[in-house]
Amino acid sequence: MTVIHSDAEFRAVLSGLPVAQQRRVGKRFLDSISELSDNPKLEKSLAVVDAPQASAQDIAEAFRVASTVARDSYTLCGREADWRRQASHFFAAAAAACLDAADKEGQGEELAWTTAMNARMARVCEKIAQGEGYDNSEVGKQYEILRAFLEDS
């Protein structure tokens, strides 16, 4: 049983996974915050991660959609400091990170890590929107998601 006590351990385990596994665990991070997404295009794009016959072209198209949503939501969320929109933007940024091309230099090592960090930012924004303090519970949840993923693999 893998136990993770720090972000350094978390990041090291994530970077040691092959790209396909990083995408699958990244999708699990996104599933845990799915209520923060307000764009149905992202759900469809993320489905490619679980599709057994997904091609590189399918992933590239899903990435294009997710990055467009992230870019468009960035311009919207910054205008009025709407924290719910900020959360939605960070969800989209996490989706884009999860689907990003792994053929870039060093990119494959960071897919799941970048997905996790954007997912945490989405949760922080949601807590601010609700007037709550951030309790860091998303970090523990991500450690547990990774542990369960490793046990299932």
Image (spheres, helix red, strand yellow):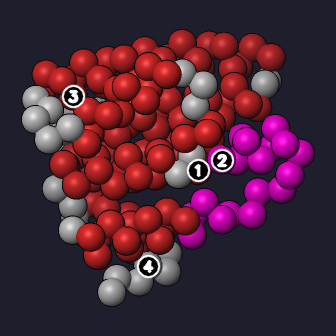
Other-residue count near label 3 (Cα within 10 Å), few / some / many at <14 / 14–19 / ≥20 = many
Residue at 58% in and 50% down: 120
Question: Judging from the image, what secondary structure is the residue with disc 4 in?
Answer: loop
Asked if residue 138 is positioned above or below residue 46 in the image, the reply reads below
Kindly indicate whether the residue at mark 1 contacts the one at mark 2 (C-beta within 8 angstroms).
Answer: yes
Which amino acid lies under the numbered mark 2 shown in the image of this protein?
A: Arg
Most prominent secondary structure in the magenta stretch? helix
Which amino acid lies under the numbered mark 3 shown in the image of this protein?
A: Ile
The image shows residue 107 at horizontal and vertical percentages of 24, 42
Kindly indicate whether the residue at mark 3 contacts the one at mark 4 (C-beta within 8 angstroms).
Answer: no
- The answer to which quarter of the image holds residue 37 is top right
Image disc number at residue 59: 3
Identify residue for label 1.
Answer: 120
- 1 or 3: mark nearer the eye: 3
- The answer to which quarter of the image holds residue 53 is top left
Question: Judging from the image, what secondary structure is the residue with disc 1 in?
Answer: helix
Identify residue for label 4.
Answer: 4
The image shows residue 104 at horizontal and vertical percentages of 18, 35
The image shows residue 112 at horizontal and vertical percentages of 35, 51
Asked if residue 34 is positioned above or below residue 55 in the image, the reply reads below
| Quarter of the image where the C terminus is located | bottom left
Looking at marks 2 and 4 on the same chain, the residue that comes earlier in the sequence is marked by 4
